Image (cartoon, coloured by chain):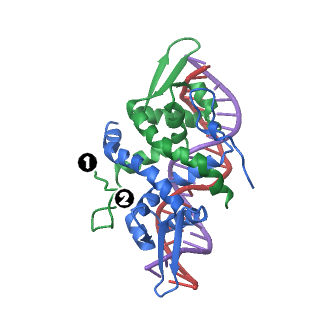
Chain colours: A green, B blue, C purple, D red
Amino acid sequence: MSVSFDISRTRPGLSGGKYPADCPTRTVLTQITSRWGVLILLALESGPLRWGELHREIEGISEKMLASTLRTFAADGIVDRQAQATIPPRVDYSLTERGHEIAARLVPLMDWIADNADDIVGGR
Amino acid sequence: MSVSFDISRTRPGLSGGKYPADCPTRTVLTQITSRWGVLILLALESGPLRWGELHREIEGISEKMLASTLRTFAADGIVDRQAQATIPPRVDYSLTERGHEIAARLVPLMDWIADNADDIVGGR
DNA sequence: CCGTATCCCGGTGGATACTG
DNA sequence: CAGTATCCACCGGGATACGG
């Protein structure tokens, strides 16, 4: 099944130009824009990181959420998990091609937010 | 109130940057990437819409969430609310300059998701 | 037509403790 | 070091009813 999503529509037609509720885009959107999803994607965008590095870099994330978000992304083929059965264990996470495509589209957004967050929050 | 933070640290390079927990970017990110925020921004990106049009276009959103998300965005200066004291009332919502800047950066992401959502969800 | 006002549920996400 | 396992608080979000 192929769901077409016409973003460049002008007016809500009868059946065109809607944002259907039962659409895979909703699922994917939710995962990517989940509370920690964006931050993980961005953190990995500049290169692979180990579990501990991610945990330290993304301040405030709990182990549970780091684990579950990474598992979801791995299942989606967005991040790649490389575990080494050494002692102590070492696990590296990196973005897949698909992950990089997403992250690349997230960067402009985050750059803008970084530049304007103060105005938005402060002006209120 | 003015919250200061080092922007160069919010999007680190390979070395040593963090994503601070007490950062305005977190607040703004949360609002924009809220469940309905992205869809509202996208819906308004191609032109102003009335309340009812938004409600119909964004399938599944409750009145409560449509109202509260719009109120938040209005307070943030992301959307503009034009009410006419007629009977029946008519209220138009449109993106501000700031809103368009955000939406413009959201479009590439949604385009990608629209093109790949099936693979991601289906492949699992 | 365009909302606001309540009530309430479910699941996200946090804290903590434990393991290979 | 890199996770799992529980427990539970909180609040995003839905349903419904009502008001300007």
Residue A101, numbered label = none
Could you tell me which secondary element the residue under label 1 belongs to?
loop
Could you tell me the amino acid type at mark 1?
Answer: Ser
Residue at left offset 57%, top offset 50%: B30
Q: Are marks 1 and 2 in contact (CB under 8 Å)?
A: no
Rendered image quadrant of residue C6: bottom right
Residue B11 at x, y percent in the picture: 58, 37
Position of residue B33 in the picture relative to residue D7 (left or right): left
The secondary structure type at the circle numbered 2 is loop
Which residue is denoted by mark 1 in the rendering?
A2
The chain holding disc 2 is A
**Residue, disc 2:** A19
Q: Name the spot of residue B102 as percent of width and height, x first.
A: 50, 54
- Image quarter of residue B15: top right
Q: In the image shown, does B8 or A58 lie closer to the viewer?
A: B8
A48 horizontally vs B113: left or right: right
Quadrant housing residue A123: bottom right
Residue at 41% across / 45% down in the picture? A28
